[in-house]
């Protein structure tokens, strides 16, 4: 069934481009049927980040000055941090958690990664002359990403097998299979960005702890309280400014994670900043 007052924008590629937003704005400017509300749903809204900020800026202007007062825009994303703050501030945010088998598996793997990286960071700040340990940090993250992607590839294979046994003609099958492959490629790309942001959050917490201890803060103020004595001994007498700069770099790189930065180089530069030259 088609609903004339409902417009759904579903990305055709790896980004949502300005032309797609322009088309959405045009559709929303057309008078609604029966003078009812018009609703625009933008799927994978975080993909607006791939056009150098132009698409997000266009969306921001639309939210601030909608075509008319009967417009409702719904932006869907799996990663709220990938939506720029100025756009988020114009929205009411609702969170849904879908506890399917695949998501539960991802959550378990993320917990495993978090525990492992916390141990690695503890080793790095304990022995700050160990350059090898610092470089192993990004290498471990690089190993983790394909492992997560394998879960999506397995899901993709099941979907394609089902389509190929559907009885559709060959042309229809090829169209559906191509769409499945494109969707899963986007999913892997989004998941990679999510992992990198997650890793930067862990590093941020470690740097905040270092800054707190250097500034004379107490153990209870730390994210990782067990690291208090290690930090106190390893960073005694150091300037706080270096670690404030590192924290700023982490936060900047986290923002650009959705724009395909070379995360390995970024991680190496930041983690090497924790070791002594």
Image (spheres, rainbow, N blue to C red):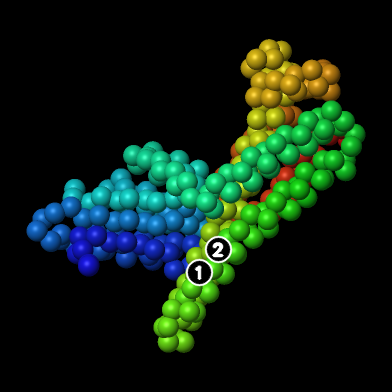
Q: Report how far apart the C-alphas of labels 1 and 2 lie in the structure.
A: 6 Å
**Residue drawn at x 73%, y 45% as measured from the top left:** 267
Is residue 150 positioned above or below 117 on the image? Answer: below
The image shows residue 78 at horizontal and vertical percentages of 47, 49
Mark 2 lies on a secondary structure that is helix
**Residue 196, placed above or below residue 155:** above
Q: For the point 84% across and 23% down, which residue is it?
A: 234
Q: Quadrant of the N terminus?
A: bottom left
Residue under numbered circle 2: 155
Q: Position of residue 229 (x, y in %)?
A: 79, 17
Determine crowd level at label 1: few under 14, some 14-19, many 20+ residues with C-alpha closer than 10 A: some
**Nearest the camera: 20 or 105?**
105
Left or right: 120 in relation to 70: right
Image-based side of 116 in relation to 34, left or right: right
Q: Which residue is mark 1?
A: 159
> Which residue: 69% across, 25% down?
224
Is residue 211 shown to the viewer in this render?
A: no
Splitting the image into 4 quarters, where does residue 169 fall?
A: bottom left
Question: Toward the viewer: 114 or 125?
Answer: 114
**Residue 143: x percent and y percent?**
74, 53
Give residue 251's mark.
Answer: none
* Residue 249 location, quadrant: top right
Q: Residues at badges 1 and 2 in contact (C-beta under 8 Å)?
A: yes
């Amino acid at each position: 069934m088609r609903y004339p007052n409902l417009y759904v924008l579903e990305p055709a590629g790896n980004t949502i481009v300005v032309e797609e937003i322009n088309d959405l704005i045009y559709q929303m400017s057309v008078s609604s049927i029966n003078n009812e509300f018009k609703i625009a749903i933008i799927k994978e809204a975080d993909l607006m980040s791939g056009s150098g900020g132009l698409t997000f800026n266009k969306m921001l202007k639309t939210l601030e000055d909608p075509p008319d007062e009967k417009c409702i825009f719904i932006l869907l994303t799996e990663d709220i941090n990938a939506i720029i703050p100025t756009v988020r501030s114009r929205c009411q945010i609702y969170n849904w958690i879908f506890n399917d088998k695949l998501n539960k598996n991802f959550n378990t793997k993320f917990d495993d990664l978090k525990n492992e990286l916390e141990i690695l960071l503890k080793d790095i700040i304990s022995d700050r002359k160990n350059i090898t340990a610092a470089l192993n940090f990004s290498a471990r993250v690089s190993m983790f990403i394909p492992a997560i992607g394998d879960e999506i590839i397995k899901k993709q294979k099941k979907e394609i097998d089902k389509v190929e046994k559907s009885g559709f003609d060959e042309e229809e099958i090829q169209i559906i299979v191509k769409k499945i492959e494109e969707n899963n490629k986007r999913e892997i790309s989004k998941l990679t960005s999510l992992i990198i942001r997650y890793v930067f959050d862990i590093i941020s917490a470690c740097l905040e702890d270092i800054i707190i201890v250097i500034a004379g803060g107490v153990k209870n103020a730390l994210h990782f309280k067990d690291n208090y004595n290690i930090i106190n001994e390893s960073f005694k007498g150091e300037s706080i400014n270096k670690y404030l700069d590192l924290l700023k770099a982490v936060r900047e790189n986290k923002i650009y994670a959705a724009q395909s930065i070379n995360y390995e180089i970024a991680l190496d530069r930041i983690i090497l900043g924790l070791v002594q030259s």
